[in-house]
Every structure is written in C-alpha cells, then in structure tokens.
Amino acid sequence: MGITTTATPGVHTHPAIAFRPLTDATPVPLLLAWHRGTPTHPAIPDLVRLARRLVAEA
C-alpha cells in the first residue's frame, strides 16, 4: 500500500493495481525545477512559460 497523487493512475496503469481516493488527504504541492543556465532540452523554456501561465490563471 502506498499514497500517490491523483495524476498517477492516468500515467501508470496496471491491471493488478487499484487506486482508491483519500477524501481527507491534504493537497500535495507540485514543484517544477530545472538546472540554471542553458536548458538541456529545447522544450524547457516553453514548458516553463506554460507552467507560469497556468499558475497565474489559477
């Protein structure tokens, strides 16, 4: 048995695993981190812009 976020069942499925919600669990903070300097993947700047936009809209 373990605890994970609600995103996990949508990304990691297996017929032998059942996910059940915890209705009284506290929210889990989500962090986005990257190495300072030149990004190692060309899509990182776009990802950062998208994340900042989504947080601003929330």
Image (cartoon, grey):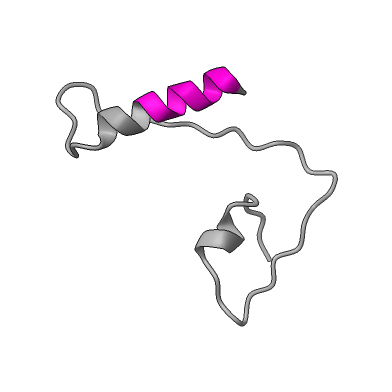
Residue 27 pos. (x, y %): 70, 36
Residue 30 horizontal side relative to residue 28, left or right:
left
Depth check: 49 or 18 in front? 49
Residue lying farthest bottom?
16
Which quadrant is the C terminus positioned in? top right
Which residue is at a point 18% across and 36% down the rendered structure image? 42
Which residue is at a point 54% across and 23% down the rendered structure image? 55
Image vertical order of residue 29 relative to residue 1, above or below: above
Q: Which residues are magenta?
A: 49-57
Depth check: 24 or 39 in front? 39
Image vertical order of residue 35 relative to residue 41, above or below: above
Which residue is at a point 76% across and 63% down the rendered structure image? 20
Residue 13 pos. (x, y %): 55, 71
Residue 53 horizontal side relative to residue 36, left or right:
right
Residue 39 pos. (x, y %): 19, 31
Image vertical order of residue 24 relative to residue 55, above or below: below
Image quadrant where residue 35 sits: top left
Image quadrant where residue 51 sits: top left
